[in-house]
Amino acid sequence: MFTVNTKHHRAARVSVGRTVVFVSGRAEPYAEKAVREASRARRTLSAAVGRQVQVTPLVVVHGAAVMRGWIRRRPCGVKVLPSRAATWWLRLRGR
């Protein structure tokens, strides 16, 4: 199960750091918010089905001119990726 938090940053420079996502040099709390969202979904789904459900948080960025660090870095354990790679990445997880 995945939670997907989408962000649109037209022509921006996005850099995925070790602990935070930077958009045009400004730190954004996207990873922390995605973790909270996944945690809420995990609790709700687990209670509904009566067993622990694994939920992975994702942040998908659309429209960025440049996006760096997304392949190796996972701030707060969150996978951050460009929208053009989202389908590819999700298909890899399904194997």
Image (cartoon, helix red, strand yellow):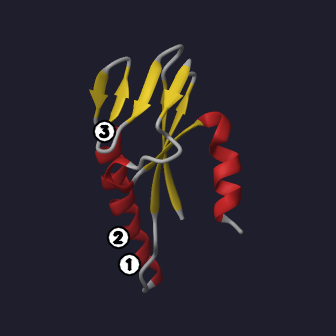
- Residue 84 pos. (x, y %): 67, 35
Q: In the displayed structure, does residue 18 sit left or right of residue 81? A: left
Compared with residue 29, is residue 12 higher up or lower down, i.e. above or below? above
Residue 20: which disc? 3
On the image, numbered disc 2 is attached to which residue? 43
Identified at 28% across, 37% down, the residue is 29
Q: Residues within 10 Å of mark 3 (few under 14, many from 20)?
A: many
Q: Tell me the element at label 1.
A: helix
Query: Quarter of the image holding residue 94?
Result: bottom right
Marks 3, 2: nearer the viewer = 3
Of badges 3 and 1, the one in the foreground is 3
Q: Which mark is residue 22?
A: none
At 46% from the left edge and 37% from the top edge, which residue is drawn?
Answer: 69
Q: CA distance from mark 3 to mark 2?
A: 24 Å
Indicate left or right for 76 with 61 as reference: left
- In the image, is 62 to the left or to the right of 77? right
The crowd level at tag 1 (other Cα within 10 Å; few <14, some 14-19, many 20+) is few
Above or below 51: residue 29 = above
Q: Secondary structure at mark 3?
A: loop
The amino acid type of the residue labelled 3 equals: Val
Question: Against 66, is 3 above or below?
Answer: below
Taking the spot 65% from the left edge, 55% from the top edge, the residue there is 90
Which quadrant of the rendered structure holds the N terminus?
Answer: bottom right
Between discs 3 and 2, the one toward the N terminus? 3
Residue beneath the point at 32% across and 19% down:
25
Q: Are marks 2 and 1 in contact (CB under 8 Å)?
A: yes
Q: CA distance from mark 3 to mark 1?
A: 30 Å
Position of the C terminus by quadrant: bottom right
Q: Amino acid at mark 1?
A: Ala
